[in-house]
Amino acid sequence: MQNLAVKVADNLYWVGAIDFDLRTFDIIVPTPFGTTYNSFLLTTNDGNVLFETVKEPFHQEHLERIENVIGKKGQINYIILNHTEPDHSGSLNYILEKHPNATVIATAAALNNLKFISHLSTTVKTACSIKLKSLQVGKYHLKFLIQPFLHWPDTMMTVIEELKVLLPCDFFAVHYAEPKLFDDQVEGKEQVLEKLYKHYFDAVMSPFKASVLKGVQLVETQMGFPVEELQAICCSHGLIIRKDIKKIIEKYKEWSEPQILKNKIVVVYASAYGYTKIMTNRIVEGIRSVGVEVSVYNIIDTTVKEILNDFKDAKGLLLGSPTIVGDATPPFYELLGHMNPFIYSNRLIQCFGSFGWSGEGVKNLIPRIQQLKVKEVNKPLSIRFRPTKEQETECFNWGKDFGTKVIDYHH
Ligand SMILES: Cc1cc2nc3c(=O)[nH]c(=O)nc-3n(C[C@H](O)[C@H](O)[C@H](O)COP(=O)(O)O)c2cc1C
């Protein structure tokens, strides 16, 4: 089967690749419908411009699609990389081999990444989009909208002003392998797609909500024309958006609204013989005594998803693990492994637990809690075997103190 380019607008072609079989992206993102690696080619009477490349194993079909537009002898003059993650930069060297005179344009952070991703030869011409701000090629003006952390530090978007087309790379993207390519040509999939867009946002963009809002603002104010006039959003994955432009922008705003955190604490514990459970019960009573809402989970009867879902709007989290064979119990590592500082550094998190002789349960959870860069408002609490009545009071007061700190905490 011949790998053909697809026309997107006058002189603008999709020349990417379709990965139907991908089921997991970036180790952590399920992709039940595969994905595409979108790359676009703008032809002008003063040179050709390639936007993004594709994941390395797909370089051959990428080259064929480019050739399908500009022929065997055609040359690419500029390669614009809005983001250097290897699913977009992985084929750069294959392109440069065929088009050695091309100038690679990207942000300073992206050009720096390329030194380590592509090991660019010193003969490769590069230009920094931050200094250029815009570029004229033939009759087209390309405008660079620099916005770091959509979703790497290197990211930007490019606007082709005359075509009123936005190329935002991963921003507004979706993992969906569909040969029809355009959102207005896919019928009856609206519900599935809505879920997939949200799933993509949650997995890729949600840790960077402040940058997302700045990115949306750039799109709304800096393209040089109103959003209403935008003809297409050419993302790096999934569908080219022509129909639902306004909808996806509004969704990104809605999904990035800062979460208002409540005076609420999620308490998660495990207990083999009930001693950490006694601690938990007293701590919860202490928290409730100052009027703070509490949810309590035995970690072996629930899922990480359920806990994190409940923790979304809570200021505080307390983890109670006993020590078993010189360590905290594994489900706590699973939970903490699903948390990261980009999302949770604005919370109050601490740990407690019962131990027998060496106490690593609490000791070993502390470094991970610190890695989340949370505020430390109280000390961890460890008790040897079964709490005494005095120690139960100590637990009550510890919970009360944490609850008070939660009330006083303004993030
Ligand atoms: C299989 C097993 C292994 C244990 N290993 C340790 C250990 O390495 N270090 C330690 O301090 N306590 C150890 N303990 C003791 C428990 O931490 C202690 O009994 C604690 O009070 C249990 O609290 P829980 O009833 O909430 O589970 C172990 C207990 C069990 C049952």
Image (cartoon, rainbow, N blue to C red):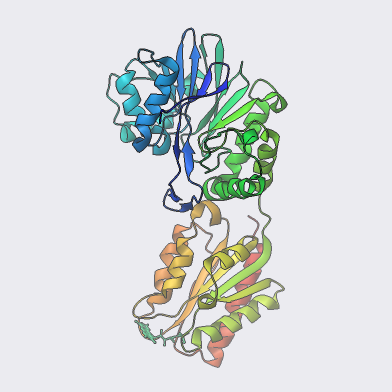
Q: Position of residue 171 (x, y in %)?
A: 56, 37
In front: 334, or 210? 334
Any part of residue 297 in sight: yes
Asked if 388 appears above or below 400 in the picture, the reply is: below
Left/right placement of residue 122 relative to residue 298 reads: left
Q: Residue furthest front?
A: 1
Residue drawn 48% across and 53% down? 30
In front: 71, or 396? 71
- Quarter of the image where the N terminus is located: top left
Residue drawn 32% across and 27% down? 94
Asked if 286 appears above or below 237 in the picture, the reply is: below
Ligand 1 image position (quadrant): bottom left
Left/right placement of residue 188 relative to residue 361 reads: right
In front: 255, or 68? 68
Q: Position of residue 218 (x, y in %)?
A: 63, 30
Q: Position of residue 371 (x, y in %)?
A: 44, 58
